[in-house]
Image: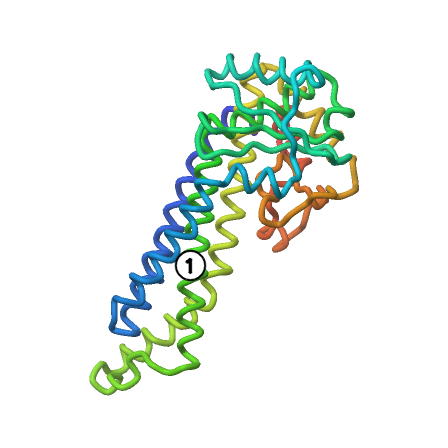
């Protein structure tokens, strides 16, 4: 039977496994492009571009995420209960008090952002505040603080860097194929092995952005399970978060401020919580809500 504790252990192992696979994909892609062109300069340029773009995104990730959500700073006088919940749980978790933001949206949702715990922020929608009682609100906030404590915001940024890096390399390679180049003139020397490597490599490069996206979403789903477990342990009341997710699941309308770039940050899919089936699950940003509720309530789905 799945419990909070077993699911927590499993997701830590699965996340590291997925990250290892991701790094192997990046290394393999870089090696093939270097091999195909017999020129390391293209790979170096791609790495520089990826680093510049993604380091900038990482450094300003909180500001970008909050701006896309149209979040505004919350005031203590207006949202006293919210501030008290965040303060108390931050002390319990041993974290600095994050900045608190309000998203003017009727859909119940929330997310955490920031490159580290010293530069973290928690944003909740007005819909969440209007629907949740104090125990449910505590469950949601504990989930978001767990993301900060587990450095999930950093992990997600690293994954986005890898996805962006793979996409840039794949784009450069496929674009240049139409312009000619590569080792075609050396195939007679290299023999059949060189031809096979080229064909397999080209297929791999074309499919790699899709593979990278699937791995990114898989990591996002595993971190949601882990944050659920840690959040429940933080409040010592799993039913609070389970009840909150039940209410979020019952709300059928998407967020007004939903954005594909930040969808993985939220506690629940901002485009709707209806679970996909079969292969569609591979492209979900979040695990099915009913599975999360079942685990929180100590049941095996």
Q: Nearer the viewer, residue 288 or 6?
A: 288
**Rendered residue at 63%/28% (across/down):** 73
Asked if residue 4 is positioned above or below residue 65 in the image, the reply reads: above
x, y (%) of residue 238?
62, 20
**Rendered residue at 56%/15% (across/down):** 89
Q: State whether residue 18 appears in this view.
A: no
User: The C terminus is located in which quarter?
Assistant: top right
Q: Nearer the viewer, residue 27 or 126?
A: 126
Q: Residues within 10 Å of mark 1 (few under 14, many from 20)?
A: many
x, y (%) of residue 6?
50, 27
x, y (%) of residue 79?
69, 18
Asked if residue 135 is positioned above or below residue 33 in the image, the reply reads: above
Q: Indicate the secondary structure of the residue bearing disc 1.
A: helix
Asked if residue 27 is positioned above or below residue 55 in the image, the reply reads: below
**Rendered residue at 56%/32% (across/down):** 112
Q: State whether residue 175 appears in this view.
A: yes
**Rendered residue at 50%/24% (across/down):** 5
Residue 9 as seen in the image, left or right of residue 32: right
Residue 231, picture quadrant: top right
Query: Which residue is identified by label 1?
Result: 166
């Amino acid at each position: 039977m799945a419990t909070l504790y077993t699911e927590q252990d499993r997701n830590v192992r699965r996340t590291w496994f997925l990250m290892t696979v991701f790094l192997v994909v990046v290394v393999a892609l870089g090696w093939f492009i270097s091999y195909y062109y017999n020129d390391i300069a293209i790979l170096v340029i791609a790495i520089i571009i990826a680093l510049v773009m993604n380091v900038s995104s990482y450094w300003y990730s909180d500001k970008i995420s909050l701006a896309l959500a149209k979040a505004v700073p919350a005031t203590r006088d207006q949202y006293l209960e919210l501030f008290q919940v965040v303060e108390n749980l931050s002390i319990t978790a041993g974290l600095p008090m994050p900045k608190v933001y309000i998203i003017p949206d009727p859909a119940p949702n929330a997310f955490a952002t920031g490159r580290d715990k010293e530069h973290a922020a928690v944003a909740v929608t007005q819909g969440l505040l209007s629907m949740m009682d104090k125990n449910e609100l505590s469950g949601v906030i504990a989930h978001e603080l767990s993301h900060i404590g587990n450095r999930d915001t950093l992990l997600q940024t690293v994954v986005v860097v890898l996805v962006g890096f793979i996409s840039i390399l794949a784009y450069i390679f496929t674009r240049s194929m139409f312009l000619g180049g590569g080792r075609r003139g050396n195939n007679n020397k290299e023999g059949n092995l060189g031809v096979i490597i080229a064909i397999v490599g080209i297929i791999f490069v074309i499919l790699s952005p899709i593979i990278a996206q699937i791995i990114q979403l898989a990591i996002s789903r595993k971190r949601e399970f882990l944050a659920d477990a840690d959040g429940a342990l933080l409040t010592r009341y799993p039913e609070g978060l389970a009840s909150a997710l039940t209410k979020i699941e019952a709300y059928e309308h998407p967020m007004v401020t939903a954005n594909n770039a930040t969808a993985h940050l939220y506690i629940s899919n901002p485009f709707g919580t209806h679970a996909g089936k079969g292969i569609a699950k591979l492209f979900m940003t979040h695990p099915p809500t009913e599975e999360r509720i079942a685990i929180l309530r100590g049941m095996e789905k």
